[in-house]
Image: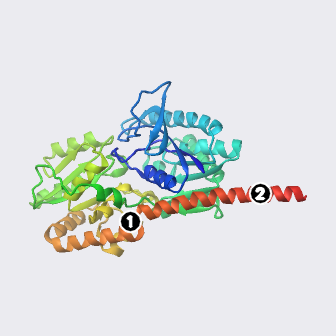
């Protein structure tokens, strides 16, 4: 098959953001398929192309993937209106490719939800096989967070969501809640596979065994690390509250390291400075391979989100699976499917949301019981190997696309036969 793959925020492992689409593309190529990746210019992402843009686009081969990159810079620092315009521009440019490129199957992954638009056009105007992957439920999540409140906009987003699901021949959801959300909108008979984010053991094994820590974090300190976006959804102010509690308790041996970027990062740094939280350290985003050095130097991975019920079963965060791959115990501050796994497999701490005392207690327990913490880390890696090995999930991904394509072809031949017989 030749696959036209739409992911606005695509990045190779050289970037500081998730690289799921790169890994899935490599699996498709290994299986004998061709992949054309269509993306924008994402903050923290590295498309692999370095030449100049010509008329707003550049194109080339990156590790066997044909990459088409639109000159559409996107950043989490942008406001809602500007981000929406970037999403729409990407969708409009993508429609043209969906209508005129040569391919067999179109695959689109959100976010944003507008990623599904070229797939809709491919399905209904060219009768192409369309598979839609959902990474976050829109508009449910922005509505629950209060980011989008305009009733008309919410209605339009809901309409696009339903149209994307119903236009797709099959869907992929990255978490149990996402799968349920798709079926609720598209019907129980819609083929939906749950293929979550996974543990990239191959990438982490490539990393040099050279653990890194900020200079201010001593060798015997407990280092809790957070890797990822510093936005409204992440609720990182909760961690600063915990840092404050630990300072009051005199626990100067517990340090927090935040690596990443986002709209709220300047405010978080200011709060830490104003409150003299010298147990908190904010680092700039780094490429994934360098990030593994800091994860090797950490004792605990923080899985933090704002206390929004829509997050409980409706997200599949990259960082959680990176922690498992590195063998890091995880401390999680919201209920849901990840919290349940942490408890079931004893691979970290699951604390109640908005409870800095319980969070601080868990960190003190981790600092005071290193043998127990090491055992949790071993359990974390075991869980990753058993359920979330990306190489296995990538094969499931390839099989799902192949199955969807051949089922569609089989259905077409069956319909043609019935037409001839009639």
Tell which circle, 1 or 2, labels the residue nearer the N-terminal end.
Answer: 1
Instruction: Please give the name of the residue rendered at 57% of the width and 37% of the height, measured from the top-left corner.
Output: 94
Q: State the SS at label 1.
A: helix
Query: Residue 21 or 343: which is nearer the viewer?
Result: 21
Q: Is residue 325 above or below residue 93?
A: below
Instruction: Please give the name of the residue rendered at 63% of the width and 58% of the height, measured from the top-left corner.
Output: 404
Q: Are marks 1 and 2 in contact (CB under 8 Å)?
A: no
Q: Is residue 176 above or below residue 73?
A: below
Residue 38 in the image: state x and y as whole percent. 51, 40
Rendered image coloring scheme: rainbow
Q: How many labels sit on residues?
A: 2
Residue tagged 1: 338
Residue 336 appearing in the image: no
Task: Say which of marks 1 and 2 sits in front.
Answer: 2
Q: Is residue 344 above or below residue 222?
A: below
Residue 368 falls in which quadrant of the image? bottom left
Q: Label 1 crowding class (10 Å Cα cut-off): few <14, some 14-19, many 20+?
A: many
Residue 9 falls in which quadrant of the image? top left
Residue 260 in the image: state x and y as whole percent. 29, 46
Q: Label 2 crowding class (10 Å Cα cut-off): few <14, some 14-19, many 20+?
A: few
Instruction: Please give the name of the residue rendered at 35% of the width and 41% of the height, measured from the top-left corner.
Output: 44
Residue tagged 2: 413
């Amino acid at each position: 098959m030749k696959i036209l793959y739409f992911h606005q925020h695509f990045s190779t492992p050289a970037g500081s953001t998730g690289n799921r689409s790169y890994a899935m593309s490599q699996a498709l190529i290994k299986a004998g398929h061709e992949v054309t990746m269509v993306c924008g210019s994402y903050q923290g992402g590295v498309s692999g192309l370095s030449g100049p843009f010509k008329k707003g686009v550049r194109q080339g081969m990156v590790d066997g993937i044909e990459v088409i990159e639109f000159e559409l810079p996107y950043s989490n620092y942008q406001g809602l209106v500007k981000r929406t315009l970037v999403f729409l521009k990407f969708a409009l440019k993508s429609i043209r490719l969906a209508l005129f490129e040569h391919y067999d199957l179109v695959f689109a992954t959100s976010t944003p939800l507008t990623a599904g638009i070229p797939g809709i056009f491919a399905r209904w105007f060219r009768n192409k096989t369309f598979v839609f992957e959902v990474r976050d439920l829109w508009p449910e999540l922005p509505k629950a967070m209060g980011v989008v409140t305009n009733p008309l906009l919410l209605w339009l987003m809901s309409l696009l969501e339903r149209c994307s699901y119903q236009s797709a021949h099959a869907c992929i959801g990255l978490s149990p809640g996402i799968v349920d959300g798709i079926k609720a909108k598209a019907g129980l008979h819609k083929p939906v596979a749950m293929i979550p984010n996974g543990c990239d053991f191959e990438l982490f094994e490539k990393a040099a065994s050279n653990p890194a820590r900020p200079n201010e974090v001593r060798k015997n300190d407990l280092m809790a690390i957070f890797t990822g976006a510093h936005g409204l959804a992440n609720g990182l102010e909760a961690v600063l509250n915990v840092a404050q509690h630990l300072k009051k308790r005199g626990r100067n041996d517990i340090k927090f390291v935040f690596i990443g970027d986002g709209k709220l990062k300047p405010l978080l740094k200011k709060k830490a400075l104003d409150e003299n939280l010298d147990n908190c350290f904010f680092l700039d985003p780094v490429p994934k391979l360098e990030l593994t050095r800091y994860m090797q130097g950490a004792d605990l991975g923080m899985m933090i989100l704002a206390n929004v019920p829509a997050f409980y079963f409706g997200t599949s965060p990259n960082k959680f699976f990176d922690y498992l791959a590195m063998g890091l115990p995880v401390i999680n501050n919201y209920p849901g499917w990840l919290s349940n796994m942490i408890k079931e497999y004893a691979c970290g701490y699951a604390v109640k949301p908005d409870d800095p005392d319980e969070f601080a207690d868990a960190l003190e327990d981790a600092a005071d019981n290193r043998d127990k913490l090491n055992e949790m880390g071993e359990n974390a890696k075991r869980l990753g190997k058993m359920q979330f090995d990306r190489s296995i999930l990538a094969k499931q991904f390839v099989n799902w696309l192949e199955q969807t394509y051949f089922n569609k072809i089989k259905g077409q031949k069956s319909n043609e036969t019935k037409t001839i017989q009639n």
